[in-house]
Image (spheres, rainbow, N blue to C red):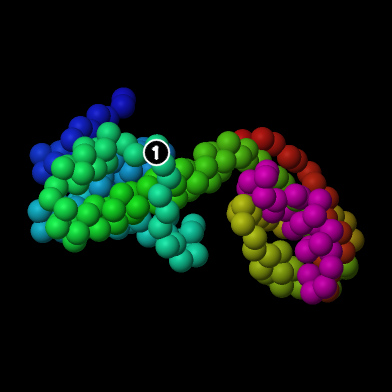
Amino acid sequence: MAVTFTDLHTESGLKSLDEFLSGKTYISGDQLTKDDIKVFTAVLEKPSGDLFPNASKWYNCVSSQLAASFPGKAVGVRIAGQATPLEAAPAKEAKDAPAGDDDDDLDLFGDETEEEKKAAEVREAAKAPSKKKESGKSSVLLDVKPWDDETDMKKLEEAVRSIEMPGLLWGASKLAPVGYGIKKLQIMMTIVDDLVSVDSLIEEYLTVEPANEYIQSCDIVAFNKI
């Protein structure tokens, strides 16, 4: 069920957010989602750690993940006509302020620039979680065959499991007899379809050096979408 937050620029709004985040790391579930991005853009600045400890911890967590996605040094930009209603009100107050209040004008300009920059970064970062969510997964059963009955099957399995890449997770395994005293390794793996090609895994990793010291060939026994 959707959760509604209001007036996140006020103490009462931040208090409501802080109470909701008690015992939670993110707004929805245990990973960063679009819900966090949406609330993050509505919070104008980092909540006080003394007044709102839960909201402050959440804000730091989201901010650090967004910063990792944008390693470059931002200098700040202004985009005409993109101010939100919350930004428009302070702008009007600045216009009505006495001409001598230069410091206030500069602070206001800095706040607007920071918010506009953050909103642009958030929109870009929001694309990554949505793409990951759309990626399908598959469960694959592989037959990994040794050269002969003298092949060390323990080292063969270690060679297989030593292969690591994003979207690949090795699962349960067992040895099955082939004949003439030779056994093969049957091993399960879960892959993210957009990140891992089973054919490339076999041709570029499992049947080339150094793994081919133990592995003669690999066959796909089962391939099922999850």
Q: Amino acid at mark 1?
A: Gln
Q: Quadrant of residue 225?
A: top right
- Report the quarter where the C terminus lies: top right
Q: Judge by depth and name the residue closer to the eye, 221 or 133.
A: 133
In the displayed structure image, the side of residue 111 where residue 135 appears, left or right: right
In the displayed structure image, the side of residue 131 where residue 64 appears, left or right: left
Magenta-colored stretch includes residue 188: yes
In the displayed structure image, the side of residue 93 where residue 185 appears, left or right: right
Magenta-colored stretch includes residue 100: no
Residue lying at 67% horizontally and 50% vertically, measured from the top left = 195
Q: Judge by depth and name the residue closer to the eye, 71 or 52.
A: 71
Q: Does residue 187 appear in the picture of this structure? A: yes
Residue lying at 48% horizontally and 59% vertically, measured from the top left = 70
In the displayed structure image, the side of residue 99 where residue 139 appears, left or right: right
Tag 1 secondary structure: loop
- Residue 97 % position (x, y): 14, 47
- Residue 218 % position (x, y): 83, 55
What are the residue bounds of the magenta stretch? 183-211
Residue lying at 89% horizontally and 61% vertically, measured from the top left = 180
Q: Is residue 94 above or below residue 216?
A: above
Q: Does residue 139 appear in the picture of this structure? A: no
Q: Judge by depth and name the residue closer to the eye, 140 or 179.
A: 140
- Residue 215 % position (x, y): 82, 66
- Residue 103 % position (x, y): 19, 61
Residue lying at 65% horizontally and 60% vertically, measured from the top left = 165
Binning the other alpha carbons within 10 Å of mark 1 as few (below 14), some (14 to 19) or many (20 upward) gives: few
Q: Judge by depth and name the residue closer to the eye, 224 or 167.
A: 167
Q: Is residue 152 above or below residue 195?
A: below
- Residue farthest along the front direction in this orientation: 99
Would you name the residue on which mark 1 appears?
A: 82
Q: Quadrant of residue 29?
A: top left
